[in-house]
Structures are given as C-alpha cells and as structure tokens.
Image (cartoon, helix red, strand yellow):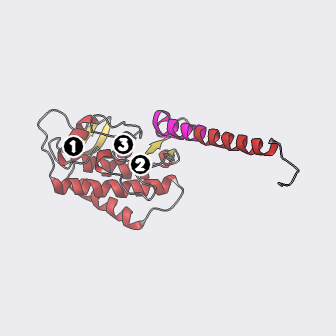
Amino acid sequence: MIDQVTPETIRLLGGRLCLDFVNSVDWSPSGEPLGAELDALRDPPWLTRWGRRVGLVAGAGARNPGAGELRKAHELRAAVHAILSAVADGERPDPEDLTTLARHHARAATEAVLARGDGGWQLSWASRDPRLVRFEAAVDAVALLADAAALARLRRCPGRNCGWLFLDTSGRRRWCSMQTCGSREKMRRLRERAKADRRDGRDAARRTAPRSDRAPV
C-alpha cells in the first residue's frame, strides 16, 4: 500500500475489525507477509497502538504485549488471511488454518467474561489485557465466517503484492482503494497501451518504408 506504515497511518479499508487486522501488512501472491517496513504490527508495543487506533484500547494504562504475544498475533493474522482469502476465491480453507483460528478463538473465549454492550451480550476482556487485539480479532473472524451474507460480499484486492481483504457493500468495488491499487493498475494499463502503440507504429513504418528492387552491384 505505502512505503512505510505505522499503526497510526495504516489505512482501515476492510469494513470490519478482523479484516483490518489482516490488512495490517501487505501480502505476496503466495500469501506471505511482505517485509517489516510494510507491517503495522511489526513491534510488540505496536499491537497496543493499533488497538488504540481501532478503538479497542482506551487511555494510556494498557500493558504492552511482549514478543511472544506478537508471534501469536502474527500466527493468527496469517491463518485468518489464508482462510478468508480462500473463501473470497471460492475455495475451501486449509484445515490447519481453521484449527489455528479455532485454537485462538477458544483461548479468547476462555479468558472472556460476558458483558452487556451494543444492545446485547458479548465476550469482553479487560482493556489493559495485552492479548486484547488478538482475542478481539479471533472472535470477529469466527463471527464473520458464520455470517453468510457478509461472506458473499468478501473480496480480495487483485493489486500486485497487496492481498488486502474487504467487504464490497456497493456490489461494484474491485480494489482495496482506487487511490492506491486501482490507480497503479490504471497506470500500468496506460503504459502497456503506450508500449503497444509504439510497437504498432514501428511495424507500420517498416511496412510503408520504400524498398529498392535493384540488387546491389
């Protein structure tokens, strides 16, 4: 998406929490995260900063997670990205990825309390818990997988080395953002068209160039 990202500058384009969580890094065509400089969750304290950015963490009293929690968050992120990418492509997710998500979800549920909010009851954790981002992302991912209407709108950006996921609520959205991947694809097509026009011009010039019928002496 951009050359350098932080939890405060990464764009939130997914349409729900678990999608913004997996979109915290760019992805290769093979589903591998692309470089630390493209990762908004590259350091343990950045989990807390990202959680604050999306409204999970309030105030300044949150405990920063350690390296072990960051590894678990990265493991969950990779599994959720793989699962939802498969769903968006009309394929069956890898059972190993589903098991990874189920394991993180089970841990989140075990550590949660039921609290009233948004007109109903929901799983809740202390805002100071350093595992909060991972727990919230796991629960939201499972909720998305249970929502057939939302899954029908799930898309993966076809931009080169992007792999971001989003909900297409308009029915016409192809790119994560027209300002980034959509614009780059437009420019690529313009360059290809200009190259083809130059090639066609050279071919036409060769066909119309005068030719001598006399053999050289």
Residue type at the position of mark 1? Trp
Point out the tag, 3 or 2, that comes first from the N-terminus.
Answer: 3
- Name of the residue lying farthest toward the bottom: 96
The residue identified by callout 3 is 20
Using a 10 Å C-alpha cutoff, classify the residue at mark 1 as few (fewer than 14 neighbours), some (14 to 19) or many (20 or more): some
> Which quadrant does the C terminus fall into?
bottom right
Query: Residues at badges 2 and 1 in contact (C-beta under 8 Å)?
Result: no
Q: What residue do we see at 14% from left, 42% from top? A: 128
Front-most of residues 212 and 203: 212
Residue type at the position of mark 2? Leu
Q: Is residue 91 above or below residue 117?
A: below
Give the residues drawn in magenta, as a range.
172-190
Residue type at the position of mark 3? Asp
Q: What residue do we see at 35% from left, 40% from top? A: 3
Judged left or right of residue 21, residue 88 is right
- At mark 2, the secondary structure is helix
Query: Could you tell me how far apart the alpha carbons at marks 2 and 1 are, in whole angstroms?
Result: 25 Å
Asked whether residue 173 appears in the rendered view, the answer is no
Magenta span: chief secondary structure = helix
The quadrant in which residue 1 appears is: top left
Residue 46 drawn at (x, y percent): 21, 43
Residue 153 drawn at (x, y percent): 51, 44
Magenta-drawn stretch contains 186? yes
Point out the tag, 2 or 1, that comes first from the N-terminus.
Answer: 1
The residue identified by callout 1 is 46
Point out the tag, 3 or 1, that comes first from the N-terminus.
Answer: 3
The residue identified by callout 2 is 144
Q: Is residue 68 above or below residue 164?
A: below
Residue 19 drawn at (x, y percent): 39, 45
Magenta-drawn stretch contains 91? no
- At mark 3, the secondary structure is helix
